[in-house]
Image: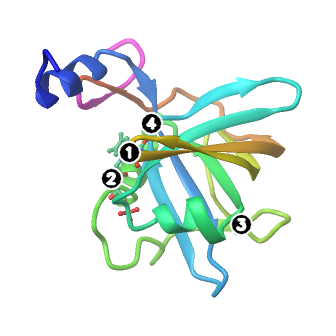
Amino acid sequence: MSFSSRDFRDCLGQFATGVAVVTARANNGAKAGITINSFASVSLDPALVLFSVDQRAATHSLFAGECDRFCINILNRDQRDLSDLFSSPVQDRWEDLVFEDDCHGVPKLIGNLATFSCKRHAIHDGGDHSIIVGHVQDISMGNTGDPLLYYGGRYHSLGE
Ligand SMILES: Cc1cc2nc3c(=O)[nH]c(=O)nc-3n(C[C@H](O)[C@H](O)[C@H](O)COP(=O)(O)O)c2cc1C
């Protein structure tokens, strides 16, 4: 490789994204979630979306294993705390958190810009990540507002 890992990450950081929290419920009823910015739309018909999850993430075994349903919660600019919460090594990320279950019992966050309720469609090899493709079963548009953005390794808001 002609470039360092640091330079690669910095270069990737030039692509501005939104931020989402992917949530799921394990077989034992435990709630799980992870902050991601690897969300992408894939297909309109069928309705497919994807995200990638690091194989070293504690939640990897859930999203690439037992949890075949998940919600992708698109965060607004006022939900930065949720992004921090679901990307930090916190004992219980769900303590004191307000959420509701979708019709399949998957926890979804409240106050998002939008939520995609998905059934896992495919898992692809993505190097040190797994690419999870979800078949969208239901959608909800939440609060109108500005998205939480991530660019250059930092959060941003529209117009900043
Ligand atoms: C803005 C942002 C975007 C992130 N995007 C991803 C992502 O797309 N995939 C991923 O695996 N981790 C991503 N992470 C890192 C995870 O959120 C973080 O490693 C988390 O602690 C993993 O939790 P877990 O070990 O409990 O699964 C992102 C973190 C932030 C702050």
Residue occupying the far bottom of the picture: 28
Badge nearest the viewer, 1 or 4: 4
Q: Which residue is mark 4?
A: 37
Badge nearest the viewer, 1 or 3: 3
Magenta run includes residue 54: no
Q: Earlier in the sequence, mark 2 or mark 3?
A: 2
Are the residues flagged by discs 1 and 2 in contact, CB closer than 8 Å?
A: yes
- With 103 as the anchor, is 122 left or right in this view? left
Q: Earlier in the sequence, mark 1 or mark 4?
A: 4
Q: Which residues are magenta?
A: 153-160
**The one of 127 and 19 positioned closer to us in this rendering:** 127
Q: Earlier in the sequence, mark 1 or mark 3?
A: 1
Between the C-alphas of marks 1 and 2, the distance is 6 Å
Q: Which mark is residue 84?
A: 2
Amino acid under label 4?
A: Asn
Q: Which residue is mark 1?
A: 80
Please determine whether, in this image, residue 4 is positioned above or below residue 19: above
